[in-house]
Image (cartoon, rainbow, N blue to C red):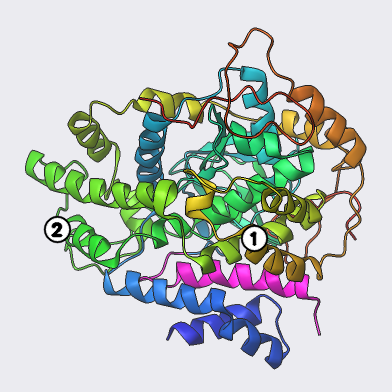
């Protein structure tokens, strides 16, 4: 029997799986050996499957990658220009723009396909809502979104707090290939 | 169909013991998720990553209409570093706009997580924490709400149905003015529902239990002390005053939550290290900016003897 901690984690992971499967047409999970699209505004490509390594590249929403091997929830991905590195699965979708038919309005499309087509609640809708609510100041939200922690800042912070071993781009954890959502693990975990 | 998906997912996640699978499928968490999944099923599709982002931004704008940010950039940078150190160990480390954390100038005991990853913590709650690990515990709980999409799930089903009815009719990438107006109304309904739930109504007790359980697991994986969540709840339970807006309105009692947390802690295997260094860092980075204006505060004065520097009650305008 697995530990309760493991089962809690598994239950949480299942929640994600169930939520992702709730739609009439499910989201498109990325798969090794296939193409995938970056579904977040920006995301780094790392030399190791951790969020605190020196990034190899910065990826943008809509960029299509070719996926290779996986390690936990990370995929080794290759850009069209040939750069290869690790990208976390939650930043990717298996959907590729233009493949789905979203024009019918039948609802037979995935949420990711809708997203890649620029549909749904978007900046245009936010602008209209903002105009109707002049008391709200979205520039404060913009300012909040500028509060960023770079991978190198994160690495220093984790190391100084004893949350990973040592420092340096080659230091820290080498990552595991288990079922963890992030291949890096805190210091003292085994 | 959903149960079959769960079974497949369970096997995929390594729960090869049938008893384990049955226990997980029968858990409250998964049963709740099934109901939500069925709700989205009825509504034709799940909300997309970008839609969640734009909903979260509008909810955040409404929260920032009620509260002011703490003006000290150093403490804002610190809370973002702690939040990032925790969020990368969540089941959902990447969202469209990413996770961002903001300390609010309010003596209320409260924290609020908007869909997509915008997370607010009041100065009153921050000062209740006695260490970086306890702050991390507070943030892990909020990050769990984001990862489990509790904000989206708290919206009345009828509002989703109305919104999706409109979202499914326009084929163009750019909407016409009439379509935008209709969509904006649906968007506003959803935003209003979530804001009310965050500020005054609170999430369901099950959602809070899920967030506490997941927070313990995230802390355990990150290297922070998972028992820090228990200590924060004990500090809340020891408070004399349990009235006013914020936490006391929106969350189950700390005593109820402690039962869940203690059960979750049984499964933790790690031995936290470096707590002394982190606690010293917390004291240093949390020091009140001497240039900040003096305020009187009816909230908490902080267990660590730090001046709160908070404001009264949190009302902004």
| Distance from Cα at disc 2 to Cα at disc 1 | 39 Å
Residue A59 appears left or right of A115: right
- Dot 1 falls on a residue whose secondary structure is helix
Q: Do labels 2 and 1 share a chain?
A: yes
User: Which quadrant of the figure contains the C terminus of chain A?
Assistant: bottom right
Q: Where is residue A182 in the image (x, y as percent from the top left)?
A: 71, 54
Place of residue B114 in the rendered image (x, y in percent of width and height, measured from the top left): 46, 45
The reply to whether residue A168 is visible in this rendering is no
Residue B113 in picture, x, y percent from top left: 50, 46
The residue at the far front in this view is B240
Determine contact: label 2, label 1, CB under 8 Å.
Answer: no
Is A8 in the magenta?
yes
Quarter assignment of residue A109: bottom left
Which quadrant of the structure image shows residue B157? bottom left
Front residue of B233/B53: it is: B233
What is the magenta range? A1-28
Please name the residue shown 52% across and 64% down the image.
B207
Chain of the residue under the numbered disc 1 shown in the image = B
Left or right, residue A72 beside residue A185: left
- Report if residue A139 lies within the magenta region: no
| Residue B165 visible in the picture | yes
- Residue at image position (66%, 36%) is B126
Q: Which of marks 2 and 1 is in front?
A: 1
Is B243 situated left or right of B282 in this image? Answer: left
Q: In which quarter of the image is the N terminus of chain A?
A: bottom right
Mark 2 Cα-neighbour bin, 10 Å: few <14, some 14–19, many ≥20: some
Image mark 2: chain: B
**Relative to A38, residue B80 above or below:** above
Which residue is the site of mark 1? Answer: B212
When the figure is inspected, residue B151 is found, relative to residue A50, above or below; the finding is: below
Q: Please provide percent x and percent y for residue A21.
A: 44, 72
Q: Name the residue under label 2.
A: B169
């Amino acid at each position: 029997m697995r530990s309760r901690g493991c089962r809690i984690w598994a239950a949480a992971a299942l929640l994600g799986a169930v939520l992702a499967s709730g739609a009439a047409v499910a989201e498109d999970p990325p798969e090794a050996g296939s193409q995938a699209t970056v579904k977040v505004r920006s995301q780094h490509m790392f030399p190791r499957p951790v969020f605190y390594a020196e990034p190899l590249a910065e990826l943008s929403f809509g960029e299509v990658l070719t996926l290779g091997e996986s390690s936990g929830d990370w995929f080794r991905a290759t850009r069209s220009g040939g750069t290869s590195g690790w990208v976390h699965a939650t930043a990717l979708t298996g959907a590729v723009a233009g493949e789905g038919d979203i024009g019918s309005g039948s609802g037979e499309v995935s949420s990711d396909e809708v997203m890649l087509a620029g549909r749904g609640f978007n900046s245009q809708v936010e602008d209209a809502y903002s105009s109707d609510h002049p008391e709200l100041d979205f520039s404060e939200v913009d300012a909040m979104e500028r509060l960023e922690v770079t991978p190198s800042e994160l690495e220093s912070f984790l190391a100084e707090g004893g949350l990973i071993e040592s420092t340096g781009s080659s230091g820290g954890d080498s990552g595991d290939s288990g079922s963890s959502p992030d291949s890096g693990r805190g210091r003292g975990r085994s | 169909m959903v149960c079959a998906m769960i079974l497949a997912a369970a096997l995929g996640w390594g729960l090869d013991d049938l008893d384990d699978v049955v226990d997980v499928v029968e858990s409250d968490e998964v049963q709740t998720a099934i109901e939500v999944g069925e709700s989205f099923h009825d509504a034709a599709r799940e909300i997309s990553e970008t839609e969640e982002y734009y909903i979260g931004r509008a909810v955040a704008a409404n929260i920032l209409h009620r509260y002011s940010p703490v003006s000290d950039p150093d403490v804002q940078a610190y809370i973002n570093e702690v939040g990032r150190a925790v969020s990368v160990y969540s089941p959902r480390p990447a969202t469209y706009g990413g996770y961002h954390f903001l300390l609010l100038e309010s003596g209320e005991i409260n924290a609020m997580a908007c869909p997509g990853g915008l997370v607010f913590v009041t100065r009153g709650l921050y000062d209740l924490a006695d260490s970086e690990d306890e702050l991390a515990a507070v943030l892990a709980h909020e990050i769990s709400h984001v990862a489990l999409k509790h904000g989206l799930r708290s919206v009345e089903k009828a509002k989703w149905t109305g919104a999706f009815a409109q979202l499914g009719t326009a084929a163009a990438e750019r909407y016409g003015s009439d379509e935008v107006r209709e969509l904006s109304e649906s968007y506003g309904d959803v935003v209003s529902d979530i804001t009310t739930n965050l500020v005054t109504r609170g999430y369901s007790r099950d959602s809070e239990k899920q967030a506490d359980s997941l927070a313990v697991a995230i802390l355990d994986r990150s290297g922070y002390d998972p028992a820090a969540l228990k200590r924060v709840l004990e500090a809340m339970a020891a408070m004399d005053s349990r009235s006013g807006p914020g936490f006391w309105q929106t969350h189950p009692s700390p005593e109820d939550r402690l039962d869940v947390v203690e059960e979750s802690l049984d499964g933790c295997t790690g031995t936290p290290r470096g707590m002394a260094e982190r606690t010293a860092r917390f004291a240093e980075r949390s020091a009140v900016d001497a240039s900040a204006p003096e305020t009187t505060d009816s909230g908490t004065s902080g267990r660590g003897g730090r001046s709160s520097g908070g404001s009264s009650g949190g009302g902004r305008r």
